[in-house]
Image: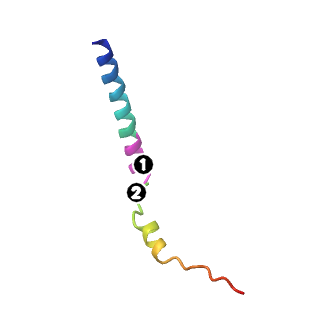
Amino acid sequence: MSAFFVLVGVSILVAGGFLGAFLWSVKTDQYEDRDGAAMRMLFDDEIQKTK
């Protein structure tokens, strides 16, 4: 039964770590430009090889 309490405690710590990382990434504007890379890929010009 004591292993159950240890596992619950560890899982709460891990979940709190993930929640903290998510809140940090939102606070530091990691999700500011969600369409930039996707749209840039569509309009990226192919480099022409010259002979």
Disc 1 and disc 2: Cα gap in Å? 7 Å
Q: Is residue 40 a member of the stretch shown in magenta? A: no
In primary-sequence order, the first of circles 1 and 2 is 1
The kind of secondary structure element at disc 2 is loop
Residue at the image point whose x is 40% and y is 57% from the top: 31
Q: Is the residue 20 above or below the residue 31 in the image? A: above
Q: Is the residue 48 above or below the residue 4 in the image? A: below
Q: In which quadrant of the rendered view does residue 12 lie?
A: top left
The residue that disc 2 covers is 31
Amino acid type, residue under disc 2 in the picture: Tyr
User: From which residue to which does the magenta span run?
Assistant: 21-29
Q: Position of residue 38 (x, y in %)?
A: 43, 68
Q: Are marks 1 and 2 in contact (CB under 8 Å)?
A: yes
The kind of secondary structure element at disc 1 is helix
Q: Position of residue 34 (x, y in %)?
A: 39, 63
Q: Position of residue 29 (x, y in %)?
A: 42, 55
Amino acid type, residue under disc 1 in the picture: Ser
For the stretch drawn in magenta, what is the main secondary structure?
A: helix
Residue at the image point whose x is 43% and y is 72% from the top: 39
Q: In which quadrant of the rendered view does residue 32 lie?
A: bottom left
Horizontal arrangement in the rendering, residue 2 relative to residue 21 (left or right): left
The residue that disc 1 covers is 25
